[in-house]
Amino acid sequence: MTSLETFTRVRGLRLASIDFGGTGVPVLALHGHFGRARSFAPLAAALAPEYRVIALEQRGHGHSERGDGDFGQDAYVADAAEFARGLGLGPLIVLGHSMGGVTAFHLAARHPELVRALVVEEGGALNRPPEVPHPVLDVSDWPRRAATLSGLRRQIEARGVPDASYFLESAVEHPDGWGLLFDYDDMMTSQRALIGDWWEQWLRSTCPALLVHGLDSFVLPTPMARLMARRRPDTVLREMPGCGHWPHDDDLDAFTETVRTFLDRL
């Protein structure tokens, strides 16, 4: 499978994306906070050739520009909508993880003509205390630079992160050492902007939806995931034991099978 990283002008911003290639049914993938488009590479390979994953690197993440510092849901959704239109592939299956999952169901609510089905991985309809005790990961004191990649990992994990692998997808070597591509202040702003009640947007769309929940997640409570599935028609909930907030990383095979089964039935 060949993948191609490209840059597209979207609403005045230069946004990166990766088309993992193929002639299968197109799937637009949206990463979560701190993520990268390339983090979907294992899933794209597992879903090929029946499905063609195209991953957008959202504003302020990876190699995409940050713009004017607007990290509200309106900005993320407008970016995704224009990018989807620009693909010219008709209504898309939209798959999103965490913040990207919230963006996905907002996109379906506001632009139903662009979305034929949703796969929401760990994106909650209510993201605020007390339902979600810690909706913001404080990265303000994370290291800006480290002499080595392993040193950067050690410093991040010393801040209480059990496994920094997800964050290190954004690690690059600069002239003065290893660092992360995203701006820490931007990520704090973006996480705070995601705090809120998103039930109206979750319930507004009518396309088929798959909600994937890791039973060990610290972000999406199990009672909320079950309520989301009960309240929204045409929604399938799949709970993944032994998985936390990143089921696509924690158990790629089970996650792929779950997604493929849902997509094959569309």
Image (cartoon, rainbow, N blue to C red):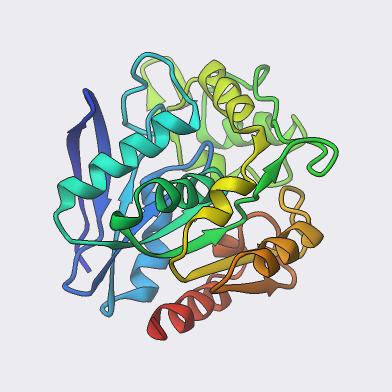
Taking the spot 66% from the left edge, 34% from the top edge, the residue there is: 196
Taking the spot 58% from the left edge, 70% from the top edge, the residue there is: 233
Q: Is residue 187 left or right of residue 156?
A: left
Give the percent coordinates (x, y) of residue 247: 61, 63
Give the percent coordinates (x, y) of residue 147: 52, 23
Q: Is residue 142 left or right of residue 223?
A: left
Q: Is residue 151 left or right of residue 264?
A: right
Disc tally is 0
Say which quarter of the image contains residue 158.
top right
Out of 145 and 21, give the one closest to the viewer.
21
As drawn, 244 above or below 110 = below
Say which quarter of the image contains residue 138.
top right
* Quadrant of the snapshot with the N terminus: bottom left
Out of 135 and 104, give the one closest to the viewer.
104
* Quadrant of the snapshot with the C terminus: bottom left
Give the percent coordinates (x, y) of residue 214: 69, 63
Give the percent coordinates (x, y) of residue 139: 65, 24
Q: Would you say residue 61 is visible in this rendering?
A: no
Taking the spot 21% from the left edge, 23% from the top edge, the residue there is: 12
Q: Would you say residue 169 is visible in this rendering?
A: yes
Say which quarter of the image contains residue 81.
top left
Out of 40 and 12, give the one closest to the viewer.
12
As drawn, 89 above or below 79 = below
Q: Residue furthest right?
A: 130
Q: Is residue 196 left or right of residue 131?
A: left
Taking the spot 26% from the left edge, 78% from the top edge, the residue there is: 49
